[in-house]
Amino acid sequence: MTMCNIPVVVYYGPSAINYQVTINNVTTSGSLGSGGAKDMDYDRLSRRLFYYVSGNFYSVEQDGSDLRDIGAVGNVDRFTVDGRNNIIYYINDLTDIISKFNMTNSAETDLGIRAKDIDMDSVNNYLVIVRTDSGSNIERYNVETEVVEAIKAGGDFPQDVSVDADNGVVYWVNVIGGSTFKVKRTSYAGITTDLNITYADRIEIAQDELYLYVLVVSNETIYKYRKNTWEQMGSIVVPSGTSGIEVAFGEY
């Protein structure tokens, strides 16, 4: 029997982690465990979901089994997982500075880089960074050489970021005047495209090979857009309090 990688849309908030998956045109929804998460990330190497809640990192299988306590770290705002090197990169919510947490020995190292959001490109070994104090809006940090390169010059106000590592593309949310949220795409070659996806309130994004998912926090809905046409293909109504979205990949 041939196994296929099927995207699993995971959405979460302080009190719950939920998911939705469609297999052979049958859609199933459920919850992972009994608690919530402040932030989540999917590691494509271990195929596990990592999440942060109440000052602690955890990881879990996609069905909610095999919960592992990774370690205690304070003041985490956003994070991403480098599964190849067993590292969690996170942004301190007091200083906006990126640090890395070694999951093998619990050592922490300050990178001295201020950021709004981060995402890991585990294919090319880049940490993609949305900057808060740089002439560049978006940069990539080579985790092996520690060299930083600009992907997009300044001029915008990026917030959330999601990396398509296989195609060398960064999807990001541009915040205009605090009241307009536009989704854009920038290639590693530095070419930026406005996708004409705009909302009047905070959004969070995630994506798989074929689709971009946009969580509109205030109206508790995830909208699904086809990447090759940017046509809206449907929506998912999510529970009140949902604040984030992630896409994992299960074998079915």
Image (cartoon, rainbow, N blue to C red):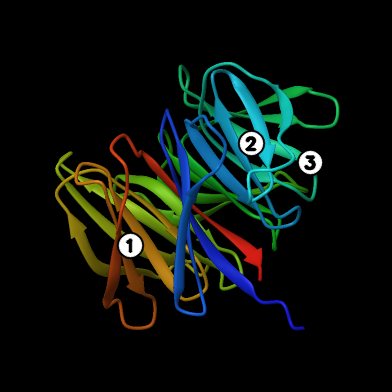
Q: Nearer the viewer, mark 3 or mark 1?
A: 3
Task: Name the amino acid type tagged 1.
Answer: Lys
Q: CA distance from mark 3 to mark 2?
A: 10 Å
Which residue matches tag 1?
184
Task: Name the amino acid type tagged 2.
Answer: Tyr
Which residue matches tag 2?
89
Image location of residue 28, percent across then percent down? 47, 62
Helix, strand or loop at disc 3?
loop
Image location of residue 124, percent across then percent down? 69, 62
Helix, strand or loop at disc 2?
strand
* Residue drawn at the location 79% of the way across and 50% of the way down: 84
Task: Name the amino acid type tagged 3.
Answer: Asn
Which residue matches tag 3?
86
* Residue drawn at the location 23% of the way across and 64% of the way down: 197
Image location of residue 237, percent across then percent down? 28, 53
Q: CA distance from mark 3 to mark 1?
A: 30 Å
Where, by quadrant of the figure, is residue 234 drawn? bottom left
